[in-house]
Structures are given as C-alpha cells and as structure tokens.
Amino acid sequence: MDRTLHATLYVVGNINVDLIMSTLHHWPAPGTEAMLEHSELRPGGSAGNCALALDAMQVPHRAVANQGSDGFASWLAGYFPNSAGHWPRYPCETSLTVAVTHPDDERSFISNQGHIVRLSADDVLQQLPPQAKPGDIVLLCGTFLCTRLLEAYPALLATLQQRGFRVAVDTGWPPQDWSDVLRQQLSGWLAHCDWLLLNEVETLGFAGLATLEECARSLATRLSGKGACVVKCGSAGAKLWQPDGHLQAAARAVTVIDTIGAGDSFNAGFLSALLGGETAQTALRWGVEVAAYAISSSPRQYPNWRTLQQRIKEC
Ligand SMILES: Nc1ncnc2c1ncn2[C@@H]1O[C@H](COP(=O)(O)OP(=O)(O)OP(=O)(O)O)[C@@H](O)[C@H]1O
Ligand SMILES: [Mg+2]
C-alpha cells in the first residue's frame, strides 16, 4: 500500500458505551440482585469499534458522531481525541449497551436510546469537508440505531456522492425486523452507495430472496456500480459480489474469545485497503485479518500497521 496517499476514511454513526457483564446463570427475579464475577467497560458501537481499529492501524480517519451530556460523555470522548472536539453535544444521556453473558456464551443486550438517535444529517455534513480529496471514503454504520439520520439517508448519500466521496454502508440488523416497507425505504439510497457491507442474515433480510447468492447479486446490481455487496460470513470468512463477478477470502483460524465488533473490525481492514488503492480481493484479506486479530484478543486489541502487514504477508 502506498502510505504517501492522504485519503481519509470518515466513520459516521453510533459511538456508545459498552458494559459487558459475565456470567449470568439466572435472571434475577424482580426486586432481587445477581452479583456477577466480571465486568468490562469499553467504548463500542459499530462506528466506535471501527474507529478504534483504524486508530490502532494508524490509518488516516475521523470518527463523525455526536455526544450526550452526562458523566459518560467525556469518558467516551477521551478515546477519540482527534475527532471528539467536533462532536455536537446534546442535552441527553450517553447511549449505552449492557451485554450480559450467559453460561453457553450467548449474550443478551439492553440498550437505552441516548445521543445516537439524535445524530442529524447536518451534524454529519458539518464534520465533513465540502469536497472530498481523491480517494476519501465515508462509512455510514449503525444505520437502524441512528434513527434520525436514517430518515435523511437518501438526501445524505446523494450529497456525499456529489461531494466526491466513495460511500460505504453497514446497516446492521434492524431492531424492528425486515419488512417490505423497510426494503422499499432502503431502496431510496442504494444507487448512491458504492460498498454495502452486511453479514449473511442481513443480506438475506435486506434483499428478501431465497439464497445468499441471489440476494447479494441483486443488491450488487442496485448499487452505484463502483463497488460491491460484501457479505461477512463469520468463521467462513467473507465474500463479495459485483454485478459480473464473485470473490471470497477464507477466515484465519483463531481461538475466538469475544466476537463483539467482528464485523466492525472487518470493515476497518477492508476499507483501509481500499483507501490505499488495493484491489477488492486484497481488501477482503485485510478485513478477515483485522477481524481475526480483534476477536482472538483479550482485553480487546487491534493490530498496528506493522503487525497487519506481517500477517498479510504470512498468508
Ligand atoms: N469464528 C471466527 N473465526 C475466524 N474469523 C471470524 C470468526 N467469526 C467472525 N470472523 C471474522 O469476522 C468477520 C465478521 O464477522 P461476522 O461475519 O460475524 O460479521 P457480523 O455479524 O457483522 O459481526 P458483528 O457481530 O460485529 O456485527 C468475518 O467475515 C470473519 O472474517
Ligand atoms: Mg455487523
């Protein structure tokens, strides 16, 4: 990769507090308490995880977000020193998610709404340059959680394209589940999107067709034509569909410790490669390497630039 390039990756969306509590054997009955052995407090959210990975990799980036005004707001901002000075402050609680781990490693999540539902298109556009530099990419993530921003997606994505950005979107799973009404709403911006980054069940839900291949191919044909539909397939790695072709990369075999943010780490690796002018095939490889590194670390760590390059060379 040509490290003299000065393109920037702008990560737009949900940055929140994650509190992971483990291990819960039985939910406490109402009015009672359960004391668990471990907890881990860390910054999270799709945009937050991706920006932290980019920071570790020393990839030029900015986290484009907003913030609340309680005690957690400055704690969270402290993890994003180069970006948080630009975040508008809303008089509300910080968005936070409590993840409770069960003995079978399944997790239950409890979240408030907080600041992320207030992020507006103006907040985003004011934090982006009026004109993209060659190669700049904007990633929009946490689509269904940033509810106010979602309403503005068709106009926002059109504006991003006009400003010259390459545009990537990772929607995540809609809490209200997929429906024809939702699919109709999303089709309003697909043509302004270059790279769609989904996992398998999201791809099936988004396109609503019978097989993964049909779904991914159908989505790929509705995008701008400059990118692809990328499908993250867990331990099976990642695949990518363009209207006229298909690529894939196997996952690296690792001991998995914590898969939270696997997809966000993949996005960081994949888009860093594109930022540096690498091919889509190489980008898939970078995505699976960064994800594998993240999910096999404890406490959570991301590779630095040298480590990533060494790992890519090894495979
Ligand atoms: N068990 C695993 N072993 C190796 N790599 C994995 C494993 N699980 C996930 N990965 C890597 O992480 C990437 C993203 O994971 P996944 O497909 O679960 O995405 P996701 O569902 O979007 O994740 P998230 O839960 O963060 O939203 C995969 O494409 C793969 O490269
Ligand atoms: Mg995901």
Image (tube, rainbow, N blue to C red):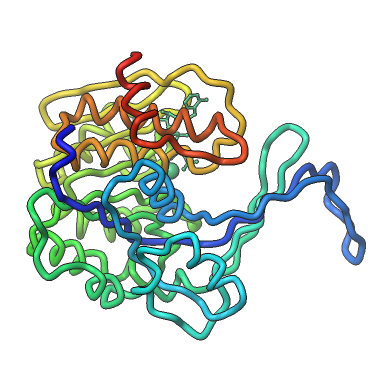
In this picture, is 10 found above or below 296? below
Q: Quadrant of residue 153?
A: bottom left
Q: Is 255 positioned to the left or the right of 38 in the image?
A: left
Viewed as shown, does residue 232 lie left or right of 279? Answer: right
Determine the residue positioned at 88% across, 63% down: 30
Report x, y in % for residue 35: 87, 53
Q: Nearer the viewer, residue 24 or 254?
A: 254
Looking at the image, which is closer to me, 297 or 174? 297
The image position of residue 262, as x and y in percent, is 47, 38
Horizontal side of 79 relative to 209 (left or right) equals right
In the displayed structure, 81 sits above or below 70; it is above
Q: Position of residue 127 (x, y in %)?
A: 26, 71
311 to the left or right of 255:
left
Say which residue appears at 59% left-offset and 68% top-offset.
112
The residue under the point 56% across, 67% down is 75
Examine the rendering and report whether any part of residue 211 can be seen: no
- Quadrant where the image shows the N terminus: top left
Q: Residue at x 73, y 32 (%)?
A: 104
**In which quarter of the view is residue 246 placed?**
top left
